[in-house]
């Protein structure tokens, strides 16, 4: 299978009249200027020079509510992007938008210009969480938009956030299950963080909002990943993009942000797998074990900062890890 590459074009808050409590797209995405339609060709050409051959490439409009732009402006952006589709330089166009900015007229325009995938910022399927987060749309909007997108032949993506105001473990699990039932083919999982100069910072400073700890966010996400993998929903991202604003801490007040968040989640998944297998494994008295896993998973099996290896050693195991390229994702052998 070919690997996928996106050419990201960020249009932060360009069309969004809502100010969700958690949102400052500029700081989260690291984007400080908005590209104009005339800039698209140069941006795409620059990326194409760096992307290896034999990849499936998409132009991706992220960061804002693309279909909330005026029809004229949407068309200007899409015309520029579609030139690369028509000339075979990219496979298609994907974009992100809000559930309440989807209708038949919009979808007709998107199909005309080669859009293949539409990602909706669902964030939660709890109406209470949506209300407390200032989302400005309903769960029914998510359901209806998802249905329209799927019926019109687009690939549906539904993004979710954990730890929003009013959220709970049970509500996040329900959101993941709803994303599956709404027909999503792909998803992104973001932990909620407190960013400077947002409404959420005010709630945090007033003691009205407490973010998840990093450990809680990892545990919630681990269980959500199982739901998506079991139902063949492709997980495009786990954790926030490590923009300079977040990595440097200039804009981060609090919350479960970590540049290795995905690795931490995968480490916990492998911790559970290894522990379960050890319970049934027949080991020699020396407790010397060799754990064989897929070459694509060995890094996670050993663990973030080798935490799984060190935990086993602290329990008295003389452990080594080996890879087997023929193993499937979570296949392992303990001998």
Image (cartoon, rainbow, N blue to C red):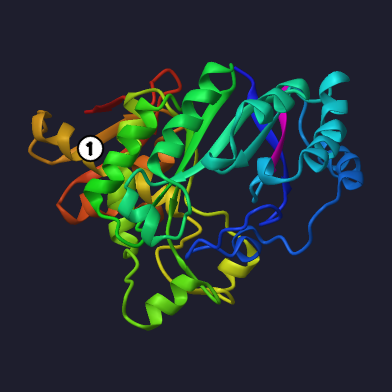
Q: Position of residue 100 (x, y in %)?
A: 54, 41
Q: Where is residue 328 in the image (x, y as percent from the top left)?
A: 38, 21
Q: Which residue is drawn at 15% across and 52% down?
A: 315
Magenta segment range?
55-61
Q: What element carries label 1?
A: helix
Per the image, the residue denoted by label 1 is 274
In the image, residue 180 above or below residue 310: above
Q: Position of residue 327 (x, y in %)?
A: 38, 21
Q: Does the magenta stretch include residue 84?
A: no
Name the residue nearer the viewer: 104 or 270.
104
Q: Is residue 25 left or right of residue 53?
A: left
Q: Which residue is drawn at 30% across and 60% down?
A: 166
In the image, residue 282 above or below residue 129: above
Can you see residue 249? Answer: yes
Name the residue nearer the viewer: 271 or 144.
144
Name the residue nearer the viewer: 136 or 126.
136
Name the residue nearer the viewer: 124 or 317.
124
Q: Which residue is drawn at 37% across and 43% down?
A: 266
Q: In this view, does 221 lie to the left or right of 185?
A: left
Can you see residue 308? Answer: no
Q: Where is residue 185 in the image (x, y as percent from the top left)?
A: 48, 25
Q: Is residue 179 left or right of residue 219?
A: right
Magenta segment main secondary structure: strand
Residue 178, quarter of the rendered image: top left
**The C terminus: image quadrant:** top left
**The N terminus: image quadrant:** top right
Q: Is residue 56 magenta?
A: yes
């Amino acid at each position: 299978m070919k690997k996928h590459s996106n050419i990201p074009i960020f249009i932060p808050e360009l069309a969004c009249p809502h100010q969700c409590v958690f949102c400052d797209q500029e700081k989260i995405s690291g984007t400080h200027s908005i590209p104009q339609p005339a800039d698209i060709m140069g941006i795409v050409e620059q990326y194409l020079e760096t992307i290896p051959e034999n990849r499936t490439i998409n132009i991706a409009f992220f960061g804002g509510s693309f279909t909330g732009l005026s029809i004229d402006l949407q068309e200007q952006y899409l015309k520029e992007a579609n030139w690369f589709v028509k000339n075979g330089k990219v496979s298609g166009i994907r974009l992100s938008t809000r559930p309440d900015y989807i209708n038949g007229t919009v979808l007709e325009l998107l199909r005309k210009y080669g859009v293949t995938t539409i990602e909706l910022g669902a964030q939660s399927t709890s109406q209470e969480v949506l209300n407390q987060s200032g989302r400005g749309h309903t769960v029914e909007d998510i359901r209806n938009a998802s249905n329209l997108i799927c019926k019109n032949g687009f690939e549906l993506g539904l993004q979710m956030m954990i730890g929003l105001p009013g959220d709970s473990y049970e509500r996040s699990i329900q959101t993941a299950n709803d994303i599956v039932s709404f027909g999503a083919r792909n998803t992104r999982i973001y932990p909620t963080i407190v960013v400077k100069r947002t409404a959420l910072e005010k709630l945090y400073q007033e003691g009205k909002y407490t973010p998840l700890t990093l450990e809680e966010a990892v545990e919630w996400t681990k269980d959500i990943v199982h739901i998506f993998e079991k139902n063949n929903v492709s997980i495009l991202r786990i954790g926030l993009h490590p923009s300079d604003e977040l990595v440097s801490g200039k804009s981060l007040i609090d919350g479960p942000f970590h540049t290795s968040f995905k690795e931490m989640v995968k480490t916990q998944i492998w911790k559970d797998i290894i522990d379960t297998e050890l319970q049934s494994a027949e080991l020699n008295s020396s407790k010397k074990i060799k754990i064989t896993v897929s070459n694509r998973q060995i890094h996670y099996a050993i663990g973030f900062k080798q935490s799984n290896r060190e935990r086993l050693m602290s329990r008295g195991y003389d452990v080594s890890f080996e890879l087997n390229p023929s193993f499937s994702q979570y296949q392992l052998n303990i001998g």
